[in-house]
Amino acid sequence: FFFQAEDGIRDHCVTGVQTCALSDLTLVSARGTGVFVVAGRVVDRDGLAAELRRVAAAGGSARPVLVKADAALTMQVFLEVCELARNAGFPGVLVAADER
């Protein structure tokens, strides 16, 4: 699934034929390749897996992860985030690309 937000994330997104509200997602903001904000908590790359597991265990695993990525996020790091989300038990990953 791919969702591109030119002016930031709006209050809902469309994924294929399915519509979801942002409250139905777990937001992960990726700032560059080493700083992440997961559900409001700032973590580094080493703490990302633990934070995703914490959010999933608190009921977050029922909703997909939305990765809000800036232009500095590499494909390798994005794929690592996807793998960590999958390992934590999330059902899927969406991406919102910020061209800045």
Image: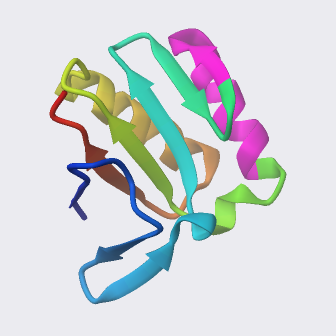
Q: Is residue 31 toward the left or the right of residue 65 in the image?
A: left
Q: Which span is picked out in magenta?
A: 42-56
Q: Quadrant of residue 17?
A: bottom left
Q: Is residue 19 above or below residue 98?
A: below
Q: Is residue 41 toward the left or the right of residue 14 in the image?
A: right
Residue furthest front as drawn: 7
Image quadrant occupied by the N terminus? bottom left
Tell me, what colour scheme is on the image?
rainbow
Q: Is residue 51 magenta?
A: yes
Q: How many marks?
A: 0
Q: Residue at x 84, y 52 (%)?
A: 58
Q: Is residue 17 toward the left or the right of residue 61 in the image?
A: left
Q: Is residue 67 above or below residue 49?
A: below
From the viewer's side, name the closer residue of 84 and 97: 97
Image quadrant occupied by the C terminus? top left
From the viewer's side, name the closer residue of 64 and 24: 24
Instruction: Where is residue 11? Give x, y as percent.
Output: 47, 67
Q: Is residue 50 toward the left or the right of residue 67 in the image?
A: right
Q: Is residue 22 above or below residue 87?
A: below
